[in-house]
Image (tube, rainbow, N blue to C red):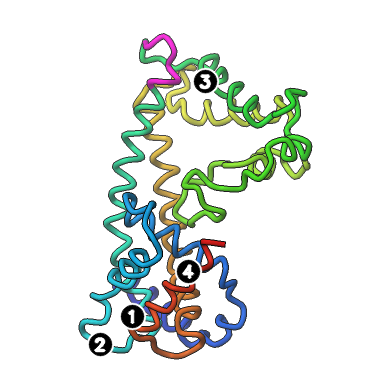
Amino acid sequence: MKKLALWMTSLTAMATAGSAVAATVDQSNAYQQAYALYVLYHPNNKEQNSSTLIKQYTQDYAELFKANKKVNQVQFVQYEQARLEPLLKQRREMSEKQAHVRYGILDNNKDQKLTLKEFQETGLKTFNEFDKNLDGLVNAEDAKLAGNSNATHDGFRVKLPISMPMPSNINEFISQYGQGKNYVTLGDYLTARDKQYFATDANGDHIVTEKEYVDEFMQRFDANIATGKVKMQETAAQQFQVIGKGKATIQASDIQQFAKNMDQAISQ
């Protein structure tokens, strides 16, 4: 009950600060975030036209307006949080299955004993994928050679807060492994992977079992989701401000107009 009360308090605070948020929200980013989330809810609808996108996006919020023709920011954020939960559960199950698959790939000789050597062999391949000119450094030169590759794994220019913090392009790789520098050496990257390996080796026997590998990944996954849910709450509040254009309440017609604007934004 205390957590619920705190959550409701934070939602109320965001609603009170709505007009201030409206003045600072990046509309382009709001459209990208909204579309990225839409595709997660409708993974089979990527090849749709503008008409079906707008219709389906508007329909996604039909339940929100059943009880009230007008809803405020608190109601909107609550609705978004509620419909996010089944998706997160599905993603968790899928991510756990993928972790088992990854272990099978890393374990080259299939003996159910992942050694540091096997782990780092994959690391070397990953580094070479980012090191476009193969000079032992990942830096701005490699970014130039890679061209316009700022999309995420889902194909978007922006990551959702619930996405795992995995580098999707060279700039993100440098940010994650460069330790404040504007480049990453092979030594930097393999040292980071050394630390990850030994952190995963729960019993310190220099062998990572499938259970250890999956457990460590799922711990990071759950921690990221916990943080991501809070950020998604903030994202929903910002989205409300863009939809309502600073108004205290929104209607179904506002959602439809937002969908039209989103369609135009992602088509540019």
Q: CA distance from mark 4 to mark 2?
A: 24 Å
Do callouts 4 and 1 mark residues in contact (Cβ within 8 Å)?
no
Q: Position of residue 34 (x, y in %)?
A: 45, 65
The residue drawn where x is 50% and y is 74% is 238
Give residue 235's position: percent from left, percent from top: 48, 68
Viewer-proximal residue, 207 or 41? 41
Query: Residue 109 lies in magenta, yes or no?
Result: yes
Give the residue at mark 2: 68
Instruction: Determine whether, in the image, residue 143 is placed left or right of residue 51.
Output: right
Q: Secondary structure at mark 3?
A: helix
**What residue type is disc 3 on?**
Phe
Looking at the rendering, the stretch of residues picked out in magenta corresponds to 104-110
- Under mark 1, the amino acid is Gln
Nearer to us of marks 2 and 3 is: 2
Image quadrant holding the C terminus, namely: bottom right
At horizontal 38% and vertical 40% (from top left) the residue drawn is: 218
Q: Residue at x 47, y 22 (%)?
A: 204
Rendered location of residue 25, percent (x, y): 58, 75
Residue indicated by mark 4: 262
On the image, numbered disc 3 is attached to which residue?
A: 119
Q: Amino acid at mark 2?
A: Asn
Of mark 2 and mark 3, the one earlier in the sequence is 2
Mark closest to the chain's N terminus, 1 or 3:
1
Tell which tag, 1 or 3, sits nearer the viewer: 1
Amino acid type of the residue tagged 4 in the rendering: Met
